[in-house]
Amino acid sequence: EHIACLALVGQQSKQYGTILDNIEKQQRPE
């Protein structure tokens, strides 16, 4: 259970990081 929980948290944090990356790209268009 503990490992599965860590995996879930890691997955969510990765998704959150991707969302932040997308926001940064929108604010600073190339």
Image (spheres, rainbow, N blue to C red):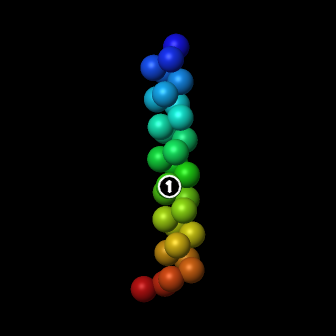
Residue 23 drawn above or below residue 5 = below
Image coords of residue 27 (percent x, y): 56, 80
Q: Around disc 1, counting alpha carbons within 10 Å, would you say few (fewer than 14), some (14 to 19), or many (20 or more)?
A: few
- The image shows a total of numbered marks equal to 1
Residue 16 drawn above or below residue 10 = below
Image coords of residue 28 (percent x, y): 51, 83
Quadrant of the rendered image containing residue 20: bottom right
Report the residue at 52% width, 67% height from top.
Answer: 22
Report the residue at 53% width, 34% height from top.
Answer: 9
Q: Amino acid at mark 1?
A: Gly
Q: Secondary structure at mark 1?
A: helix
Report the residue at 52% width, 31% height from top.
Answer: 8
Image coords of residue 24 (percent x, y): 52, 73
Q: Quadrant of the image for the C terminus?
A: bottom left
Residue of label 1: 17
> Going by the picture, which residue comes out furthest to the left?
30
> Going by the picture, which residue comes out furthest to the top?
1
